[in-house]
């Protein structure tokens, strides 16, 4: 059960904080592997992986980085070397979990290191900007863990020690208890906004499980879509069922509730067979504290909770979205099937519900059909996305792809 933790940081400026963190890991029976990512200074004590080894990994030298005269450019190259070294060390079996600490510079580098590791490897970042909108969704590994570093900008103090001691226990405990993903059965990646707004997962999950698949459902409120896209781009899924596209709407209209600018492209890049429907794409998510943009000021508004609120789209905006969806799907390298349920795309757009907008829905359907012609495979369904008929069409398509050898058959007992 002895586990080794890779500790990454600038050992020239944060030696005291890093030494304290290392001491807490060692005191709990763990081992450490240290990586220095300093540029200007030298660590007061020896480290296992020096900054010279880190820069050499990308064909650079410390003197060369200093000569650049730009700290941002220099640290970006250091980040590239650190990420490469992190993966090399992991592949060599040198450590079981990773932890890095820092301010904006250290966090920037740590994000690259975390992305270099497979899902299931504990990866912790102790950061003074944890949870900040400064950190773009596409920079985060699918299972990275953040700890806000209270009072940690410079020097040890009781607040700083509290954060670091918890972080030490978290990463070592995770390394001891983690159950790495077991892919004995093919995994289907599915998106949904929730079980009340979008209900298909309640029907599809047991049906897919019975067919011998594991089903990973991602909550499309920014971070969920980020993780979904990352894994889809890596080819982690046997098939994708991307039926909630609200995050694409959000990024196109400037919402902070974003999964990144590459939403609806990961499966296409990896060639993973994908089924897509525009669930919940008729409303814009905004952070609960975010000001409603002026152009949406007179729109129907819903305060979901203190974290998130919604405004509605008009017919023109929905038509533009329809074309954008088709444009992105048309670039896919693998099998793609786009489902267009003509009677609605989320529970609250049904007749009598607050988001009911027949004109907007008709515009979306018409624009989708026009844009899809001769560009992508699209099936128009005379049903609502939450109807059984939608799920039956999805399952029929999966069975067809399995029969054609495009999707591996499930593994049943």
Image (tube, helix red, strand yellow):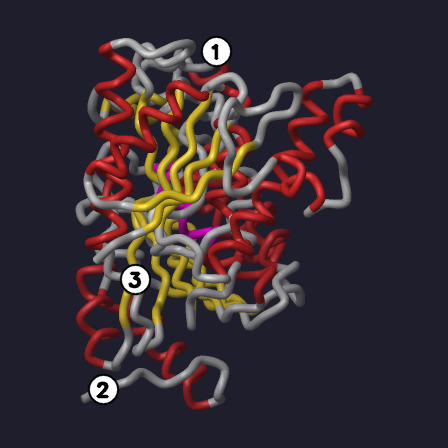
First reached walking from the N terminus: tag 3 or tag 2: 3
Name the residue at 46% across, 14% down. 293
Q: Quadrant of residue 132?
A: top left
Name the residue at 40% across, 11% down. 291
First reached walking from the N terminus: tag 1 or tag 3: 3
Q: 155 or 359, which lies in front?
A: 155
Q: Residues within 10 Å of mark 3 (few under 14, many from 20)?
A: few
Q: Which residue is labeled 1 in the image? A: 294
Q: Does residue 143 sit above or below 334 in this rendering?
A: above
Residue 192, percent across and down? 30, 50
Query: In which quadrant of the rendered image does the N terminus lie?
Result: bottom left
**Observer able to see residue 359:** no
Residue 148, percent across and down? 32, 22
Q: Which residue is labeled 3 in the image? A: 180
Q: Which residue is labeled 2 in the image? A: 412
Q: Secondary structure at mark 3?
A: loop
**Region in magenta:** 221-230
Name the residue at 72% across, 45% down. 58
Residue 372, percent across and down? 60, 60
Look at discs 2 and 1 and give the one toward the viewer: 2
């Amino acid at each position: 059960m002895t586990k080794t933790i890779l500790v990454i940081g600038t050992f020239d400026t944060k030696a005291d904080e890093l030494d304290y963190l290392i001491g807490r890991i060692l005191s709990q029976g763990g081992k450490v592997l240290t990586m220095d990512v300093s540029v200007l200074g030298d660590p007061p004590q020896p480290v296992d992986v020096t900054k010279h080894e880190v820069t050499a990994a990308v064909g650079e030298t410390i003197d060369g980085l200093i000569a650049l005269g730009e700290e941002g450019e220099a640290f970006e190259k250091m980040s590239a070397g650190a990420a490469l070294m992190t993966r090399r060390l992991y592949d060599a079996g040198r450590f079981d979990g990773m932890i890095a600490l820092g301010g904006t510079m250290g966090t920037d580098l740590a994000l690259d290191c975390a992305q270099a590791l497979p899902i299931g490897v504990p990866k912790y970042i102790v950061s003074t900007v944890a949870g900040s909108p400064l950190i773009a969704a596409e920079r985060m590994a699918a299972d990275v863990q953040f700890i806000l570093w209270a009072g940690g900008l410079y020097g040890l103090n009781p607040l700083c020690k509290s954060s670091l001691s918890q972080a030490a226990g978290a990463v070592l405990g995770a390394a001891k208890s983690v159950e790495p993903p077991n892919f004995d059965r093919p995994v289907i990646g599915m998106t949904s906004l929730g079980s009340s707004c979008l209900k298909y997962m309640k029907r599809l999950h047991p049906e897919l499980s019975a067919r011998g698949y594991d089903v990973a459902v991602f909550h499309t409120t920014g971070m969920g879509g980020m993780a979904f896209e990352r894994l889809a781009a890596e080819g982690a899924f046997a098939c994708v069922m991307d039926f909630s596209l609200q995050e694409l709407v959000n990024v196109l209209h400037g919402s902070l509730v974003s999964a990144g600018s590459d939403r609806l492209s990961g499966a296409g890049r990896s060639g993973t067979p994908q089924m897509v429907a525009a669930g919940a794409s008729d409303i814009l998510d905004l952070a609960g504290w975010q000001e409603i943009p002026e152009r949406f000021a007179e729109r129907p508004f819903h305060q979901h909770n203190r974290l998130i609120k919604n405004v509605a789209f008009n017919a023109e905006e929905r038509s533009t979205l329809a074309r954008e969806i088709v444009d992105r799907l048309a670039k896919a390298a693998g099998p793609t099937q786009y489902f267009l349920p003509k009677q609605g795309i989320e529970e609250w757009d049904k007749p009598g519900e607050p988001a009911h907008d027949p004109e907007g829905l008709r515009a979306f359907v018409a624009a989708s059909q026009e844009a899809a012609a001769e560009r992508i495979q699209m099936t128009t369904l005379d049903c609502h996305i939450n109807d059984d008929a939608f799920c039956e069409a999805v399952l029929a398509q999966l069975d067809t792809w399995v029969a054609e050898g495009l999707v591996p058959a499930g593994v049943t007992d």
